[in-house]
Image (spheres, rainbow, N blue to C red):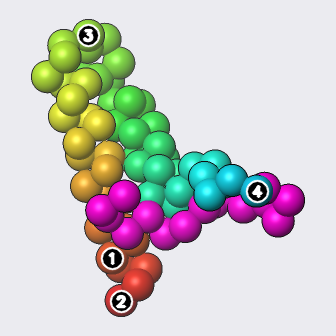
Amino acid sequence: MSKETGGPVMPSEYSLEENQGITLRDYFAAKAMQGFAASPSMIDSNDSRAISYVADASYAMADAMLAARNA
């Protein structure tokens, strides 16, 4: 992955695979997405542009959180 991911959220010492679950970046993005989805203006929206905006904005927020964490 080209972006800093923060590593796995809950890695397992027993996993032989490189992919050990979701990354910290994915975790932060999921939390941000929950906040966006809780907005009344987003709840009833099936507009693909609104959905793409939420996905992009969630990862942008996750990237900012990782940057602040590493500062």
Q: Can residue 63 be seen in this view?
A: no
Indicate the position of residue 45 as horizontal and vertical percent values.
Answer: 25, 14
User: Residue shown at 72%/61% (left/top)?
Assistant: 11
Q: Give the range drawn in magenta.
A: 1-15
Q: Which of 40 and 22 is in front in this view?
A: 22
Looking at marks 4 and 1 on the same chain, the residue that comes earlier in the sequence is marked by 4
Looking at the image, which residue sits at the far left?
A: 49
Prevailing secondary structure of the magenta residues: loop
Indicate the position of residue 10 as horizontal and vertical percent values.
Answer: 71, 59
Pointer 1: what residue? 67
Query: What amino acid type should be assigned to the residue bearing mark 1?
Result: Ala
User: Residue shown at 35%/79% (left/top)?
Assistant: 68
Could you tell me if the residues under marks 3 and 2 are in contact, i.e. CB atoms within 8 Å? no
Pointer 2: what residue? 71
SS at mark 4 in the image: loop
Could you tell me if the residues under marks 2 and 1 are in contact, i.e. CB atoms within 8 Å? yes
Query: What amino acid type should be assigned to the residue bearing mark 3?
Result: Asn
Quick check: 27 left or right of 69? right
Pointer 3: what residue? 46
Quick check: 24 left or right of 53? right
Is 50 placed above or below 4 here? above
Which corner quadrant holds the C terminus? bottom left
